Image (tube, rainbow, N blue to C red):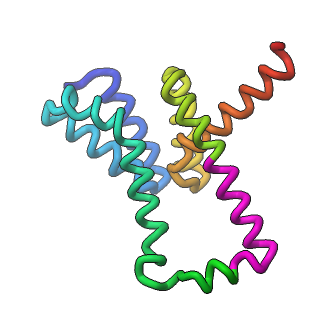
Amino acid sequence: MFNLSTLFLIIIFTLAYIGKNQSIMIAVYILLGIQLLKLDEKLFPFIQQKGMTIGITIITISVLVPIATGEIGFKELVDSVKSYYGWIALGSGLFVAIVARGGLDLLTNDPHLTTALVMGTIIAVVFLQGVAVGPLIGAGIAYMIMRIVDFLFVN
């Protein structure tokens, strides 16, 4: 049960505790529980393969709740695009979704970079009060910057 991955998770948990980040503490607690119950060989591959999709779906549900409750409707949509802030928000949503697509490609095709992305996310969440949606968008930004660097300096 106790190996280097467990030690690494305990270190991450400790950092999350110090930084008072409940999301990371819960995530580590669940992963350690899966290991302790010896369900890791069955569950970890599933979580690794489907976890991002499940997480994005849960976040999307959360964002859509105001529409489902009627708090946000067509009137609010029309009102939002009447201001330049609304257009900035619309453009930002488009940009982030496109950048995140590159992040999924990067995480799928270069999993060794996931370590650096995860550590960056953990550091930001624990010490800078960031939010742990960072790995996907972080991967997307990294992917975009890598393509720019390749274009400018490699070709």
Left or right: 91 with respect to 19? right
In the rendered image, the quadrant that contains the N terminus is top left
Q: Is the magenta stretch mostly helix, strand or loop?
A: helix
Residue shown at 49%/23% (left/top)?
111
> Within the magenta stretch, is there residue 134?
no
Left or right: 41 with respect to 111? left
Where residue 59 sits, quadrant-wise, is bottom left
Residue shown at 47%/77% (left/top)?
66
Q: Which of 30 and 147 is in front in this view?
A: 147
In the rendered image, the quadrant that contains the C terminus is top right
Where residue 14 sits, quadrant-wise, is top left
What is the residue that sits farthest to the left in this orientation? 37
What is the residue that sits farthest to the top in this orientation? 155
Relative to 60, say whether 118 is above or below. above
Left or right: 27 with respect to 89? left
Residue shown at 36%/42% (left/top)?
51
Residue 17: give x, y in percent of width and height. Answer: 41, 50
Q: Count the labels in the image.
A: 0
Residue 139 visible somewhere in the drawing: no
Q: Nearer the viewer, residue 81 or 59?
A: 81
Residue 102: give x, y in percent of width and height. Answer: 61, 35
Residue 147: give x, y in percent of width and height. Answer: 74, 26
Residue shown at 41%/48% (left/top)?
24
Left or right: 105 with respect to 61? right
Q: Which of 76 and 122 is in front in this view?
A: 76
Residue 117: give x, y in percent of width and height. Answer: 56, 34
Q: Which of 1 and 85 is in front in this view?
A: 85
Residue 50 visible somewhere in the drawing: yes
* Magenta stretch in the rendered image: 80-97
Relative to 81, say whether 24 is above or below. above
Where residue 89 sits, quadrant-wise, is bottom right
